[in-house]
Structure formats: C-alpha cells, structure tokens
Amino acid sequence: MRSTVLGLLVAGVGLVGCAHQSSDPFSPSAPLAPDAGPVSAATLAVDPAPAPAAARPENRDGRWLSATTESDFMLTGRTAQAIGVFIDVPQGASPGHVPTALTLAIDTSGSMRGDSIVHAREAARRLVEQLADGDRLSIVTFADRARVRMDPVILDARSRSTALAVLEELSADGGTAMFDGLKLAESQMWGTPESHLVRRMVVISDGKATEGPTSPEDLGRIAEVGLQRGIQVTSVGVGLDYDEAILNELAIRSSGRLYHVEHSQQLSGIIEQEVALLEATAAAEVEVELVAAPGVRLLGTDVARTRWDGDRLMVPIGAVFEGQQRELLVRAVVDEAEVGSKVLASVRMHFRDPAEDGLRRVQETVLRATVTDDPSLVAAHANSRTQTLMAMREASAIAQLASNRASAGDLEQAEAELVRAERQLQAQAARASNQVDRDRATRSAEKMASSRRQISKAKRKPASARAHDSRQMALELNDAAMADKGF
C-alpha cells in the first residue's frame, strides 16, 4: 500500500534528470562527444504491475533475461544508442520462504511522539510476528544517539517474545542521529551466515537527520557499502516532514525500496507488503554483467551502484521476487564497422539460487543487431519494448521534476510538467507495435492524467491549505517516481 493519491503514477519507468526532448540522452541522434569516456544513461526499474505471464513469450530454455537494441538496426559511427536489458521473473519462481536476516532501524526522536511511535511499534511487532523461525533479527533505534536494542538472534518462540517486549518499551524523545543509526543497524548484519540469502534493513523515520552527518550523499554511502555485503534498505517515510532525498538515496544505493505513508497508521500495511515481497524471493545477490563485443563500446549507466570491472559493466541488483520486472537502459556505440549482422554484447545475470541451496548460477543472452550506415533503416525498424521503456523513463524524469516543483509550492508548473509527460506517453502508445507495449504506455499516460487532475484540484484550494497540499503532492509524486524506477 503506497500513498493512495498518486501511488500508481507511472508503470515501470525511471531516469531522473532533464527530460526535454532536445536533451534526451537516449535520442538516436544524440552525438557522442569526441573525448567522451564512460557516461551515464541508464537505470533499473520494477514494474509495479508486471505484464501477465502470457503477455510476453517465455524463453524456451527458461531464461528470465533478454536484451534488445532500440532498433533492429544500429548505426555505425560515433552515435550513442540505447540497449534495453530485461529481467522478467515469472510467477511461481520463488521456492518458498528463503532464510532472512533483517534489522529494524526505528527513529525514536522527539518528532515520533504520540501516534507515530505507537504505530511504529505496531508495524514492527507485525513484522516480527510474520518472520519465520530460523530468520535472523536485530533491532536498532536512533534519537540523540544510536542504540542496539537487540543483538542479532535467530528467531524462535523465546527470542521472538524478547523482541516483542523490546518493541513495546520504545518511546520517543530527542534529536535524530540517523547517520549513526544506519551505520549501527548495518553493522548488525555483517556476520550474517551464508545460509541467510535475503538481507534487509528496514528504516522507519518521520523526520530529517539533525545529529552528525546529515547530507543525502553521506547517508547514501552507508547503504552503498551495505549492498556490497548483500544488504538492501527498505526506507519508510512517515508524514510530510521527512527528508525524501535521504530516503531516496538509501533505496537507490542499496537497490532497495521506498515507501511514503502520510499517516502512521498505514505503517502496518507497508510492513505486511514488504514481508510478502521477501516471502516471494526468487533469486538473491543478482548482478547484471555486460561484456561488449570487439568494435562496440559500452558507455555506462546513471545508477550509483554501477561499477566497471576492467571493460565489463557490472550492475548490482540484489534480490528479485516472483512477478517482478527489472529493466536497464545502457548506451553503447558501434565504432566503424562493416554493415551487416553483428554480435554486440554478452549480457549475463549472476545470482544465487534459493531453490538450489544458494548455488551461484549464471544466465546469459547474446545481443545482436544489424549494423548500418543508413539512419532511415534505424528509424523504420524501431524495437517497441526498448522504445517504450525509453519514453517511459523520460516521463518518470518529468514526474520527478513535477515533484520538485510541487515541493517548492509551484503547483502550476508541476501540472504543466505532468501534461507534457502525459502527451509523450500517449505519443509512444500510438507508435508501439504491439498491444503489450501500447497498453503499458497508455496505462501510464492515464495515471499521469489522474495525478494532474489531483494537482489541479489542489490549486483551487485556499492559500492557507496550499502549503500542506503542495508538500503532500511532492512526496506522493516522489514516491510514485521512485516506485516506477524500481525502488
């Protein structure tokens, strides 16, 4: 249960940044600077409403991995072009419960007094009750300082009762030492045994960091370090006063999740949703690797998690769940080459398989296209799935921009941005060559329209109510844009 007004804004899109068509980093005509090195042009997404299993042809060899260029033809020369990488996790792919290590990091600062701490305790209690015997749990709180409330334990009847008693005693007072709280919470999972493939830190906060380092970059680095140990962060922002930039960074840098709840009584529903996701884990420690063929250069991604290993491009993803769709856009250049069919890259998905006792496995697909020096062939043979993803990424960037406008109180401009995104999605729906992609773009356009109408209503309210509504809209737009990027 994400925020209810705009929680379904766009389906499966991403890429935060400038979204005007003239600066679209995936435009087929975008030139590559002669001295360009690795540059940013991709992100990952989870479609919150993935296509039904029958809507996409299944690979006969059971692979979840596929890749396509933006056109069946690819220009030779120095023009950067997009590659779409898709991980479609089928329903039923989970083997059942996967042993989980989880740390609760709960904000107990003064701003959590009253209903917020009551509902936080209740949400945490439900989480503890729903974890399985054999899972690993620890509890950390942060206010003026960070405290370990319960060291990591393997859950059984006795330790579960102890955890519930610890939660019942939590109260709220003081400042918000979020940096120390996150570091301490993350450290609780450093000794997690190999048997526990799912590693999650759940952060519940309703405010801004006030003690110690407070920048999104500083706090985001904690999450990025944790991902190297397989730890992902679920950030839950409560109310209208939390710093969405910090919670965004925690989710993005750990390939985790972000939820916005306006009212603290919604916390229990969020926790139940998160536990259901963990119960549907299909693969852990997932990482996408791209290896370019001779004559092809990969230019990089825009996600903080991307790294280069020599000439191999590596994108850590973490755990994936049944029914999820993960998507990645990469820019690449085919250097001077003869026209004709060409292998462009090997795309590999490394993962640990919970159904096979955590065995490390690899799926691979080989990406091919026809190289040409004729731009008209590229334009005439567009790949609908990658083109739809590109258009929706741009729409997501506009949604994020609309969030920023709303946060500044400029609902007029926020509405105008959403109109622009809606029109672009409608245009892509008209261009799509198959019903699946057409429906996907259309649904997203309709949700943009719904969000736009909500903003239009807020504009007509008295000035005294507009500050509250502007902030509410900003957080809901941010939450929706983050969800549509897979976080």
Image (spheres, rainbow, N blue to C red):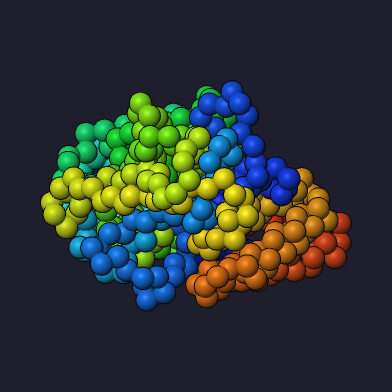
Q: Observer-nearest residue: 198 or 53?
A: 53
Say which residue appears at 33% left-offset and 44% top-offset.
346
Q: Residue at x 68, y 66 (%)?
A: 427
Residue 155: x and y, percent?
A: 19, 51
| Residue visible at 58% across and 56% down in the picture | 377
From the top left corner, tell me how far across and down residue 484 is, in percent.
53, 57
Q: Is residue 117 above or below residue 447?
A: above
Q: How many marks?
A: 0
Q: Residue furthest left?
A: 357
- x and y percentages locating residue 479 in the rendered image: 57, 54
Q: From the viewer's perspective, tell me whether residue 411 is left or right of residue 249.
A: right
Q: Is residue 123 left or right of residue 481?
A: left
Q: Quadrant of residue 316?
A: top left
Please name whichever residue, 83 or 77, is drawn nearer the observer in this view of the structure: 77
Report whether residue 25 is seen.
yes
Q: Is residue 395 found left or right of 116 in the rendered image?
A: right
| Residue 451 in sight from this viewpoint | no
Question: Relative to residue 456, is residue 140 drawn left or right?
Answer: left
Q: Name which residue lies at 38% across and 29% down.
A: 311
Query: Residue 71: x percent and y percent?
Result: 52, 55
